[in-house]
Image: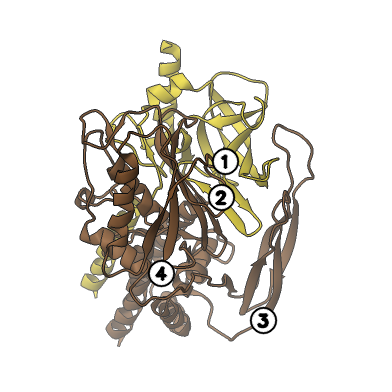
Amino acid sequence: MLVRKKTACVFMAAFAGTVCFCAPAFALMVGLSTEKLTLDAELVVTGYVEDTVSQWTADNKSIVTTAVITVEQYIKGTSAQKKIQVVQMGGQVGDVIMKVSDEAALKKGERVLLFLSPEHELSGGAACKIEGRAQGKYAIGEDGIARKWGFSVDAVNEEMDNTIHIEKLMEKIRRYADEK
Amino acid sequence: MKNKQLLHYSAVLCCLSAALLCACTGDAYGYTVSTYNGHEIKWPAPSADYYINPSGFPAAAPQAIQAALQTWTDVATSSFSFVYQGETSSTAYGVSDGTNLICFGSLSGGSTLALNTFWFTAQGTLLDSDIKFNSKFAWATDGSAGAYDVQTVVLHELGHALSLEDLYGAGDTAKVMYGYVSAGSIKRALSQDDKDGITYLYPVGGGTTTSTIQTTTTTIRTTTTTILTTTTSTIGGGGGTTPTPATTTALSFTTTTTTTNTPSTNTPSTTTPSTTTTVGTYGLCPAQKVLGADNPKLENLRAFRDGLLAQSKVGRRITRIYYNNAESINAAFERSPALRALARNFFEAAAALAGRKQEQDSDMQ
């Protein structure tokens, strides 16, 4: 009986480990290091996705999604704003979904770390965009681990920090921002 | 007897584990298929037309792209064919106009080599797929070092257009759907796993069936669900009404079918829950018993059950076995705290994995 329990535990651990490392994606990008993302972004924030709304653009040709981020803290840059709007191409309106291959969807309720810059094309600078598309978004888990996925890059870049503890990540970002 | 029962429960849990594993990774098959809310994303027929706008491409790029289209079409075990429709001057990249376009130009965000914008319905039916190469990078058709090979990259992107996803495993490096492509490298032939992927989606004799499977949510015992009914917003902090949450209480042992309205132009989405229908009586869900009725992780497990498991006979059978044995499984949990603790760990891990899978699916939104 004990052996069977152990077997079950081993099986479950094995499958959990296998699935955890699964990260399907849909893109082809140059890998951006944390340093590069930090330098390119005007703002780096942690916060929660308060809401997301998708709608057609004025020309009815595309769908854009606006996410409202409730900022926990500014890691790079400062602002009095406690809420930031982030605009991304793609989304769902009714029965129709538009997907752009390497955009990282912001999911309502999730805690995130974002590398942001002003977005001019769609919002005239009133909203932000994510630097490096999916590479500029970390989802922060309850375990304190920041993870990013949803893209593929032209070569393995060991400085990309795809999975890293949030405290360590913030420390790196602050260091890179200060060096600048 | 106890051993026999434990074996039985373990079998049920292992079946769920295997189903989760297959659903979340696809690695057992050597390829991964894109899904959206449990629906496989597929073309309505085993065929897709593509046009090429040669402007800006290297001179031989149209031939290289045609060769890539033909490579996927030539898979003998699949009925799918990419049909080259000729050159166009269209620059309508990313527009759902029914014209699938491969073009060349600048892309916002300087780190993107190539982009695939595609449109599909909530039921997973593909409508349009456009591929754009970033003119910022060096492209070649002759394998020049330091330049990206057009045929290699478009072959990979067409795999995405078929609904195959990137693979990252150490054993995936030879596959076209491997997630890393280096400048100067050439990969113009499909691996057997790539072929298996297109064959799975569009088998010979598979006809023109679409993946229009109705979304069904099964709710066990009384559960309160909050659904966002109306949302409007304007980019740039403009007007809009506040999202209105509506609360609906599902009855015990019921099936709830959720339908999505067809959009009108420029109208934000509206989701309307329909009425409920009693379908049968089951024992208390063991996961609910172990995790607690109010545990939010149950939603992940339910979504997994009602999405991926509900799509296949095997999945539905696993669900049926699970619920048919719910009472005896629960009784075993009562008798054995150790088994209960083991099951709790399992369900929590499974919920986390199912949640991760949903996140990946939601990335498609």
Q: Amino acid at mark 3?
A: Thr
Q: Do the residues at pointers 3 and 4 share their chain?
A: yes
Residue B255: quarter of image = bottom right
In the shown orientation, is residue B118 left or right of residue B22?
A: right
Q: Residue A89: which disc?
A: 1
Mark 2–mark 4 distance (CA, rounded to whole Å) = 43 Å
- Within-10-Å neighbours for mark 1: few <14, some 14–19, many 20+: many
Q: Amino acid at mark 2?
A: Met
Closer to the camera in the image, A41 or B163 = B163
Residue receiving disc 4: B340
Q: Colour of chain B?
A: brown
Residue receiving disc 2: A98
Number of the front mark, 4 or 1: 1
Closer to the camera in the image, B246 or A133 = A133
What SS does tag 1 mark? strand
Q: Do the residues at pointers 1 and 3 share their chain?
A: no
First in sequence: mark 3 or mark 4? 3
